Amino acid sequence: MREALEKIEQAAKEQLEMVSEAKALEELRVKFLGKKGELTAILKQMGKLSPEERPVIGQLANKVRSDIEQAIAQRLESINNAEKEKRLKEETLDVTLPGKKIKIGKPHPLNKVLNEVEEVFIGMGFDIVEGPEVETDHYCFEALNMPKHHPARDTQDTFYINENVVLRTQTSSVQIRTMENTKPPIRIISPGRVYRSDTVDATHSPLFHQIEGLVIDKGITMSDLKGTLELLMKRLYGEECKIRLRPHHFPYTEPSAEVDIMCFNCGGKGCSMCKQEGYVELLGAGMVHPKVLRDCGIDPEIYSGFAFGIGLERITMGRFNINDMRLLYENDLRFLGQF
C-alpha cells in the first residue's frame, strides 16, 4: 500500500505539469482526491492492514493528500498568472497611435432655422404651443370661419381620415384651441407638421412644416403685425432685409395680407427668380376676424389681434439659398453636411 500511495503522488505531480487550463486541473483533482478518486480507493483498503501498519499508512496517506493539494494550488496559481499576462499583452494600448475621429451630428437645416425663429419670439415674450396633428373638422375648418362649402375642405386638398377627422392642413387649429382655453393677453407661436394633398416637386410636398403666430390683446393693430414680422425677417436675413404687405383674403383674418420679402438674388431690382417684381411671396397674415374671436369666447369689442402663418421650408430655403424642397427630406449627408 505504501508503494501504491507513492505511485499516486508521483503520477499526480507528473500529470499536473502537463495541465495548462483550470478546467483540466479540476478534473485531475477529482481523479486523485475525489470521493471516487484513486487516493480514496486506497484508503478504503485500510481495514485490511494490521493495527501496527494503520497509523503509519494513515500518516503517509495524509501527507500524500497534502502534497497533491499543495501541488494543485501552485499549478492553479501558475495558470492564473499566465492567463493574466496573456490578457495584458492582448489588451495593451499603443498610446502613440492616432485616435479615431468621432463624427458629431449637427441640427437639420429645418431645426436650425426653427430654433432661430423660436429664439426670436421667446425674446418678444411669446410662448411655444403645440397641438395634435390629427384634427377634427371643427378646429381645422369650422372654427376658422371656413364653412362646409369652402374649397379648402375639398378631398383633393385635404387628407380625410373620416368625415369629421382630418390631418391638419395648418397649425391654425392650435390657435383656436389656445383662444378657447386661455384668456387674453395671448402671445404664441405654434410650429409643427401639416399635411396637404400636393404633388411632390421642387416647392411642394404632402408633408411640410408651418409656424403660425397669434397675438390677442387690447389695442393690437396691423402696425404691430408688420413690426413683429419685420423684426423676425431682419434677424433671419440681416438688417438690410425689407418686407411689404399686399391686400389679400383669408377667411379667418380681416383685413388680410400677403407678406413678401425683398428678393435675395437681386436686392429688389427685379430678376428671373422674383419674376422681375423685386419681392418674393413669403407668408400670409392679417387681423383675426371678429367672428373667430367671438366663437372662441373673446369679445371683439374689447380685444383685437393678429395672426400669421409661415412655411418653415420656405424660410429655410431662403435662409440657405436652397432651390429644391426635396433636398430637405432625402437625408443625404453630402447635402446636410453643408449646414
Image (cartoon, helix red, strand yellow):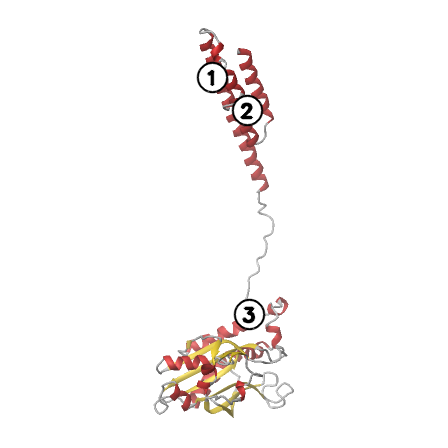
Q: Dot 2 surroundings within 10 Å: few (below 14), some, or many (20 or more)?
A: some
Location of residue 192 in the rendering, given as x and y in whole percent from the top left corner: 49, 75
| Residue 128 on image: x %, y % | 43, 75
Q: Earlier in the sequence, mark 3 or mark 1?
A: 1
- Under circle 3, the secondary element is loop
Q: Which secondary structure, mark 2?
A: helix
Quarter of the image holding residue 228? bottom left
The residue at the point 59 percent across, 57 percent down is 101
For the residues labelled 2 and 3, the Cα–Cα distance comes to 68 Å
Dot 1, how many residues are within 10 Å of its Cα: few (below 14), some (14-19), or many (20+)? Answer: few
Mark 3–mark 1 distance (CA, rounded to whole Å): 78 Å
Query: Of label 2 and label 1, which has the lower sequence position?
Result: 2
Q: Give the residue at mark 2.
A: 31
**Marks 2/1: CA distance?**
17 Å
Query: Could you say which is closer to the camera, residue 187 or residue 93?
Result: 187
Vertical order, 190 against 288 (above or below): above
Q: Position of residue 214 (x, y in %)?
A: 43, 83
As shown in the figure, which amino acid type bears the numbered disc 1?
Answer: Asn
Residue 178 in view: yes
